[in-house]
Image (spheres, helix red, strand yellow):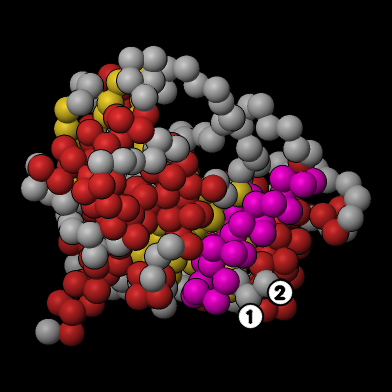
Protein backbone atom coordinates (compact mmCIF):
# COMPACT_ATOMS: atom_id res chain seq x y z
CA UNK A 1 0.00 0.00 0.00
CA UNK A 2 2.77 2.41 0.93
CA UNK A 3 6.46 2.60 0.14
CA UNK A 4 9.61 2.75 2.24
CA UNK A 5 9.06 4.87 5.36
CA UNK A 6 11.63 7.57 6.06
CA UNK A 7 11.49 9.79 9.12
CA UNK A 8 11.58 13.45 8.11
CA UNK A 9 11.61 16.09 10.81
CA UNK A 10 9.89 19.42 10.33
CA UNK A 11 13.23 21.15 9.78
CA UNK A 12 14.07 23.26 6.76
CA UNK A 13 16.86 21.08 5.41
CA UNK A 14 15.03 17.75 5.54
CA UNK A 15 11.84 19.21 4.08
CA UNK A 16 13.78 20.90 1.29
CA UNK A 17 15.32 17.54 0.43
CA UNK A 18 11.79 16.10 0.24
CA UNK A 19 10.39 18.88 -1.90
CA UNK A 20 13.23 18.54 -4.41
CA UNK A 21 12.61 14.82 -4.91
CA UNK A 22 10.98 13.97 -8.27
CA UNK A 23 7.60 12.27 -8.56
CA UNK A 24 9.05 8.79 -9.12
CA UNK A 25 10.94 9.05 -5.82
CA UNK A 26 7.89 10.41 -3.99
CA UNK A 27 5.85 7.46 -5.30
CA UNK A 28 8.22 4.97 -3.63
CA UNK A 29 8.62 6.73 -0.27
CA UNK A 30 6.17 7.41 2.55
CA UNK A 31 7.57 10.13 4.84
CA UNK A 32 6.95 9.93 8.54
CA UNK A 33 6.90 13.59 9.46
CA UNK A 34 7.97 14.25 13.02
CA UNK A 35 6.81 17.71 14.08
CA UNK A 36 9.25 19.03 16.66
CA UNK A 37 9.74 22.43 18.19
CA UNK A 38 12.64 24.49 17.02
CA UNK A 39 15.86 24.38 19.02
CA UNK A 40 17.32 26.66 21.63
CA UNK A 41 17.39 30.28 20.57
CA UNK A 42 14.18 30.30 18.52
CA UNK A 43 12.44 33.63 19.01
CA UNK A 44 9.02 32.73 17.61
CA UNK A 45 6.05 31.75 19.75
CA UNK A 46 4.78 28.17 19.88
CA UNK A 47 1.63 29.14 17.99
CA UNK A 48 3.58 30.53 15.05
CA UNK A 49 5.97 27.60 15.14
CA UNK A 50 3.23 25.01 14.71
CA UNK A 51 1.68 26.93 11.85
CA UNK A 52 5.08 27.37 10.22
CA UNK A 53 6.02 23.70 10.37
CA UNK A 54 2.59 22.60 9.14
CA UNK A 55 2.90 24.96 6.19
CA UNK A 56 6.41 23.67 5.44
CA UNK A 57 5.11 20.11 5.26
CA UNK A 58 2.22 21.18 3.05
CA UNK A 59 4.58 22.84 0.60
CA UNK A 60 6.97 19.88 0.61
CA UNK A 61 4.44 17.06 0.16
CA UNK A 62 1.26 18.48 -1.37
CA UNK A 63 -0.28 15.99 -3.83
CA UNK A 64 2.73 13.67 -3.58
CA UNK A 65 1.21 10.59 -1.99
CA UNK A 66 0.56 9.41 1.55
CA UNK A 67 2.57 10.43 4.59
CA UNK A 68 2.45 9.88 8.33
CA UNK A 69 2.25 12.79 10.75
CA UNK A 70 3.31 12.63 14.40
CA UNK A 71 3.62 15.51 16.85
CA UNK A 72 6.62 14.49 18.94
CA UNK A 73 6.46 17.47 21.29
CA UNK A 74 3.61 18.76 23.45
CA UNK A 75 1.98 21.81 21.90
CA UNK A 76 -0.23 23.89 24.17
CA UNK A 77 -1.61 26.70 22.06
CA UNK A 78 -4.05 29.57 22.52
CA UNK A 79 -5.78 31.82 20.03
CA UNK A 80 -6.50 31.63 16.33
CA UNK A 81 -6.96 28.43 14.34
CA UNK A 82 -4.28 26.60 16.35
CA UNK A 83 -6.22 27.18 19.56
CA UNK A 84 -9.44 25.55 18.39
CA UNK A 85 -8.70 22.02 19.54
CA UNK A 86 -6.17 19.22 19.88
CA UNK A 87 -2.99 20.27 17.99
CA UNK A 88 -2.48 16.84 16.41
CA UNK A 89 -6.00 16.88 14.98
CA UNK A 90 -5.66 20.47 13.72
CA UNK A 91 -2.38 19.74 11.96
CA UNK A 92 -3.81 16.72 10.16
CA UNK A 93 -6.94 18.62 9.12
CA UNK A 94 -4.83 21.56 7.94
CA UNK A 95 -2.64 19.23 5.85
CA UNK A 96 -5.61 17.36 4.40
CA UNK A 97 -7.23 20.63 3.36
CA UNK A 98 -3.90 21.67 1.82
CA UNK A 99 -3.77 18.60 -0.41
CA UNK A 100 -1.53 16.40 1.76
CA UNK A 101 -2.68 12.78 2.25
CA UNK A 102 -1.69 12.65 5.89
CA UNK A 103 -2.24 9.66 8.17
CA UNK A 104 -2.32 10.48 11.90
CA UNK A 105 0.16 8.66 14.14
CA UNK A 106 -0.55 7.79 17.76
CA UNK A 107 2.32 6.80 20.04
CA UNK A 108 1.15 3.67 21.82
CA UNK A 109 2.43 5.00 25.15
CA UNK A 110 0.11 8.02 24.70
CA UNK A 111 -2.97 5.94 23.91
CA UNK A 112 -4.54 6.55 27.33
CA UNK A 113 -4.76 10.26 26.52
CA UNK A 114 -8.50 10.32 25.82
CA UNK A 115 -8.55 13.74 24.15
CA UNK A 116 -5.64 12.98 21.83
CA UNK A 117 -6.89 9.52 20.87
CA UNK A 118 -10.45 10.68 20.26
CA UNK A 119 -9.33 13.60 18.08
CA UNK A 120 -6.98 11.46 15.95
CA UNK A 121 -9.75 8.90 15.54
CA UNK A 122 -12.07 11.59 14.23
CA UNK A 123 -9.50 12.55 11.58
CA UNK A 124 -9.04 8.92 10.57
CA UNK A 125 -12.79 8.40 10.20
CA UNK A 126 -13.59 11.72 8.52
CA UNK A 127 -10.97 11.23 5.80
CA UNK A 128 -11.12 7.43 5.61
CA UNK A 129 -7.34 7.23 5.98
CA UNK A 130 -6.99 5.02 9.04
CA UNK A 131 -4.21 5.66 11.52
CA UNK A 132 -0.82 4.39 12.64
CA UNK A 133 0.34 3.14 16.02
CA UNK A 134 3.97 3.85 16.85
CA UNK A 135 5.53 1.14 18.99
CA UNK A 136 8.92 1.86 20.57
CA UNK A 137 11.75 -0.44 21.65
CA UNK A 138 10.69 -0.68 25.30
CA UNK A 139 7.30 -2.06 24.27
CA UNK A 140 8.66 -4.97 22.23
CA UNK A 141 9.68 -7.21 25.11
CA UNK A 142 6.10 -7.83 26.29
CA UNK A 143 4.36 -8.91 23.09
CA UNK A 144 1.04 -10.11 24.51
CA UNK A 145 0.68 -7.03 26.74
CA UNK A 146 1.53 -4.76 23.80
CA UNK A 147 -1.13 -6.46 21.64
CA UNK A 148 -3.70 -5.85 24.39
CA UNK A 149 -2.72 -2.18 24.55
CA UNK A 150 -3.00 -1.96 20.76
CA UNK A 151 -6.56 -3.27 20.93
CA UNK A 152 -7.33 -0.74 23.66
CA UNK A 153 -5.92 2.05 21.49
CA UNK A 154 -7.98 0.92 18.50
CA UNK A 155 -11.10 1.01 20.65
CA UNK A 156 -10.32 4.53 21.82
CA UNK A 157 -9.69 5.61 18.21
CA UNK A 158 -13.02 4.11 17.16
CA UNK A 159 -11.37 2.13 14.34
CA UNK A 160 -10.81 -1.47 13.29
CA UNK A 161 -7.42 -3.20 13.51
CA UNK A 162 -7.47 -3.51 9.70
CA UNK A 163 -7.28 0.29 9.52
CA UNK A 164 -4.06 0.43 11.55
CA UNK A 165 -0.46 0.63 10.34
CA UNK A 166 2.13 -0.52 12.89
CA UNK A 167 5.30 1.57 13.01
CA UNK A 168 7.97 -0.20 15.05
CA UNK A 169 10.41 2.61 15.77
CA UNK A 170 13.66 1.34 17.30
CA UNK A 171 15.30 4.75 16.84
CA UNK A 172 18.93 3.68 17.33
CA UNK A 173 20.11 0.23 16.23
CA UNK A 174 23.34 -1.15 17.72
CA UNK A 175 25.03 -4.22 16.32
CA UNK A 176 25.09 -5.88 19.74
CA UNK A 177 21.32 -5.45 20.06
CA UNK A 178 20.45 -6.96 16.68
CA UNK A 179 19.65 -10.48 17.99
CA UNK A 180 17.32 -9.03 20.65
CA UNK A 181 15.60 -6.74 18.14
CA UNK A 182 15.08 -9.62 15.73
CA UNK A 183 13.68 -11.99 18.35
CA UNK A 184 11.34 -9.44 19.92
CA UNK A 185 10.00 -8.15 16.61
CA UNK A 186 9.37 -11.69 15.37
CA UNK A 187 7.52 -12.53 18.57
CA UNK A 188 5.37 -9.39 18.38
CA UNK A 189 4.52 -9.98 14.72
CA UNK A 190 3.73 -13.62 15.36
CA UNK A 191 1.25 -12.59 18.04
CA UNK A 192 -0.15 -9.79 15.87
CA UNK A 193 -0.63 -12.14 12.91
CA UNK A 194 -2.90 -14.26 15.11
CA UNK A 195 -4.58 -11.63 17.24
CA UNK A 196 -4.39 -8.22 15.57
CA UNK A 197 -5.18 -8.05 11.81
CA UNK A 198 -3.19 -4.86 11.11
CA UNK A 199 -3.08 -3.09 7.73
CA UNK A 200 0.72 -2.90 7.43
CA UNK A 201 3.88 -3.04 9.53
CA UNK A 202 7.15 -1.12 9.21
CA UNK A 203 10.47 -1.43 11.06
CA UNK A 204 12.26 1.90 11.48
CA UNK A 205 15.74 2.60 12.85
CA UNK A 206 19.10 4.26 12.34
CA UNK A 207 22.64 2.94 12.66
CA UNK A 208 24.53 6.21 12.22
CA UNK A 209 26.99 6.73 15.11
CA UNK A 210 25.81 9.06 17.84
CA UNK A 211 29.01 11.14 17.80
CA UNK A 212 30.43 11.33 14.28
CA UNK A 213 33.32 13.54 15.36
CA UNK A 214 34.56 10.74 17.63
CA UNK A 215 34.75 8.11 14.90
CA UNK A 216 35.42 10.06 11.69
CA UNK A 217 38.85 11.79 11.55
CA UNK A 218 39.13 15.17 9.86
CA UNK A 219 39.09 14.99 6.06
CA UNK A 220 38.70 11.23 6.02
CA UNK A 221 35.89 8.92 4.91
CA UNK A 222 34.39 6.22 7.06
CA UNK A 223 31.71 3.63 6.24
CA UNK A 224 29.01 2.47 8.61
CA UNK A 225 26.77 -0.52 7.76
CA UNK A 226 23.08 0.17 7.33
CA UNK A 227 22.01 -2.19 10.08
CA UNK A 228 18.37 -1.30 9.52
CA UNK A 229 18.53 -3.06 6.13
CA UNK A 230 20.18 -6.10 7.64
CA UNK A 231 17.60 -6.31 10.42
CA UNK A 232 14.77 -6.01 7.91
CA UNK A 233 16.16 -8.92 5.88
CA UNK A 234 16.57 -11.04 9.01
CA UNK A 235 13.01 -10.37 10.16
CA UNK A 236 11.61 -11.15 6.73
CA UNK A 237 13.64 -14.35 6.59
CA UNK A 238 12.58 -15.33 10.11
CA UNK A 239 8.91 -14.91 9.26
CA UNK A 240 9.16 -17.23 6.28
CA UNK A 241 6.22 -15.59 4.52
CA UNK A 242 3.06 -13.99 5.82
CA UNK A 243 2.18 -10.36 5.46
CA UNK A 244 5.02 -8.18 4.12
CA UNK A 245 7.20 -6.07 6.39
CA UNK A 246 8.29 -2.66 5.14
CA UNK A 247 11.59 -0.98 5.87
CA UNK A 248 12.12 2.44 7.38
CA UNK A 249 14.94 4.72 8.54
CA UNK A 250 15.95 8.18 9.67
CA UNK A 251 17.36 9.28 6.28
CA UNK A 252 20.78 10.89 6.67
CA UNK A 253 20.29 12.25 10.18
CA UNK A 254 20.61 10.69 13.61
CA UNK A 255 17.54 9.99 15.76
CA UNK A 256 18.96 12.46 18.28
CA UNK A 257 19.29 15.27 15.71
CA UNK A 258 18.03 18.62 16.99
CA UNK A 259 18.02 21.78 14.88
CA UNK A 260 19.16 24.80 16.86
CA UNK A 261 20.05 28.36 15.99
CA UNK A 262 23.70 29.41 16.00
CA UNK A 263 26.18 30.73 16.14
CA UNK A 264 28.26 27.53 16.26
CA UNK A 265 31.90 28.59 16.35
CA UNK A 266 33.28 25.04 16.10
CA UNK A 267 30.86 23.45 13.65
CA UNK A 268 32.49 21.35 10.93
CA UNK A 269 31.38 20.39 7.43
CA UNK A 270 30.11 16.85 6.94
CA UNK A 271 28.57 14.86 4.13
CA UNK A 272 26.42 11.85 5.03
CA UNK A 273 26.02 9.85 1.84
CA UNK A 274 23.83 6.74 1.71
CA UNK A 275 25.20 3.75 -0.19
CA UNK A 276 23.67 0.38 -1.02
CA UNK A 277 24.67 -1.39 2.20
CA UNK A 278 26.53 1.30 4.13
CA UNK A 279 26.53 5.02 4.80
CA UNK A 280 29.61 7.04 3.90
CA UNK A 281 30.53 9.90 6.23
CA UNK A 282 33.07 12.57 5.36
CA UNK A 283 33.95 15.23 7.92
CA UNK A 284 35.92 18.46 7.78
CA UNK A 285 37.34 20.47 10.67
CA UNK A 286 36.29 23.29 12.96
CA UNK A 287 35.22 26.41 11.09
CA UNK A 288 37.78 28.18 13.26
CA UNK A 289 40.45 26.45 11.16
CA UNK A 290 38.84 26.68 7.71
CA UNK A 291 35.74 28.25 6.18
CA UNK A 292 32.80 25.89 5.75
CA UNK A 293 32.59 26.70 2.03
CA UNK A 294 36.16 25.48 1.55
CA UNK A 295 35.52 22.39 3.65
CA UNK A 296 32.41 21.37 1.71
CA UNK A 297 34.21 21.88 -1.58
CA UNK A 298 37.05 19.62 -0.44
CA UNK A 299 34.63 16.98 0.84
CA UNK A 300 32.58 17.05 -2.39
CA UNK A 301 35.69 16.43 -4.45
CA UNK A 302 36.85 13.73 -2.05
CA UNK A 303 33.51 11.91 -2.30
CA UNK A 304 33.68 11.89 -6.09
CA UNK A 305 37.32 10.80 -6.05
CA UNK A 306 36.50 7.78 -3.87
CA UNK A 307 34.45 6.33 -6.71
CA UNK A 308 31.26 5.90 -4.69
CA UNK A 309 29.44 8.91 -6.14
CA UNK A 310 26.15 8.01 -7.83
CA UNK A 311 26.47 10.61 -10.59
CA UNK A 312 25.03 14.06 -11.15
CA UNK A 313 21.73 12.71 -12.54
CA UNK A 314 20.91 10.49 -9.58
CA UNK A 315 19.21 13.16 -7.44
CA UNK A 316 18.91 16.88 -6.90
CA UNK A 317 21.50 16.62 -4.12
CA UNK A 318 23.96 14.70 -6.31
CA UNK A 319 23.63 17.34 -9.00
CA UNK A 320 24.61 20.06 -6.53
CA UNK A 321 27.60 18.06 -5.27
CA UNK A 322 28.79 17.65 -8.86
CA UNK A 323 28.30 21.33 -9.61
CA UNK A 324 30.18 22.39 -6.50
CA UNK A 325 33.10 20.10 -7.31
CA UNK A 326 33.21 21.17 -10.96
CA UNK A 327 32.90 24.91 -10.46
CA UNK A 328 35.17 25.10 -7.44
CA UNK A 329 32.66 26.81 -5.18
CA UNK A 330 30.37 25.14 -2.64
CA UNK A 331 27.63 26.25 -0.28
CA UNK A 332 28.71 26.54 3.33
CA UNK A 333 25.18 26.44 4.72
CA UNK A 334 24.65 23.28 6.86
CA UNK A 335 20.88 23.40 6.19
CA UNK A 336 21.54 23.13 2.45
CA UNK A 337 23.72 20.09 3.09
CA UNK A 338 21.05 18.39 5.19
CA UNK A 339 18.78 18.88 2.17
CA UNK A 340 21.44 17.45 -0.17
CA UNK A 341 21.97 14.42 2.06
CA UNK A 342 18.20 13.88 2.38
CA UNK A 343 17.57 14.19 -1.36
CA UNK A 344 20.24 11.62 -2.14
CA UNK A 345 19.00 9.24 0.56
CA UNK A 346 15.41 9.31 -0.69
CA UNK A 347 16.61 8.52 -4.21
CA UNK A 348 18.59 5.55 -2.88
CA UNK A 349 15.67 4.01 -0.98
CA UNK A 350 13.31 4.67 -3.89
CA UNK A 351 15.67 2.70 -6.12
CA UNK A 352 15.74 -0.10 -3.54
CA UNK A 353 11.94 -0.22 -3.44
CA UNK A 354 11.85 -0.42 -7.25
CA UNK A 355 14.43 -3.21 -7.30
CA UNK A 356 12.54 -5.21 -4.66
CA UNK A 357 9.31 -4.86 -6.64
CA UNK A 358 11.03 -6.12 -9.78
CA UNK A 359 12.37 -9.16 -7.92
CA UNK A 360 8.90 -9.99 -6.56
CA UNK A 361 7.46 -9.88 -10.10
CA UNK A 362 10.06 -12.34 -11.43
Indicate whether 165 appears above or below 13. Answer: below
Q: Where, quadrant-wise, is the C terminus in this rendering?
A: bottom left
Q: Residue furthest toward the bottom?
A: 361
Q: Main secondary structure of the magenta part?
A: helix
Residue 220 percent across, percent down from the top left: 17, 27
What residue appears at the point 36 percent right and 64 percent down from the top-left corner? 4
Q: Which residue is mark 1?
A: 128
Report x, y in % for residue 20: 43, 62
Based on the picture, tell me whether residue 11 belongs to the magenta stretch: no
Q: Is residue 313 above or below residue 217?
A: below
**Mark identifier at residue 316:** none
Q: Please provide percent x and percent y for residue 183.
A: 27, 47
Q: Which sits in the foreground, 265 or 217?
A: 265
Q: Are marks 2 and 1 in contact (CB under 8 Å)?
A: no
Total count of labels: 2
Q: Is residue 260 above or below residue 56?
A: above
Tell me residue 143's x, y (percent): 43, 51
SS under mark 1:
loop
- Residue for point 31% across, 71% down: 244
- Secondary structure, mark 2, is helix
The magenta stretch is 47-71
Q: Is residue 189 at least partly visible in the picture?
A: no
Image quarter of the N terminus: bottom left
Which mark is on residue 97? Answer: 2
Amino acid sequence: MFGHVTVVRSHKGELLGCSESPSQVAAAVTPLFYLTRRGVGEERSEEVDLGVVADRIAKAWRRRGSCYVNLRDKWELDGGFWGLGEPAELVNRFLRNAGVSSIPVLDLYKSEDASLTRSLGSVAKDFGCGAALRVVDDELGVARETIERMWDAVGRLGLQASQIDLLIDLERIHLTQMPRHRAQILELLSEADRLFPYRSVTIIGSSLPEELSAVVPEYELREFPRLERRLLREVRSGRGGGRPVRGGDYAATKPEFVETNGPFPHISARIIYTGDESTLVLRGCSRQKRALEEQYLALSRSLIAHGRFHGDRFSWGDRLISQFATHGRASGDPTTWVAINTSHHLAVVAKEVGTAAEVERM
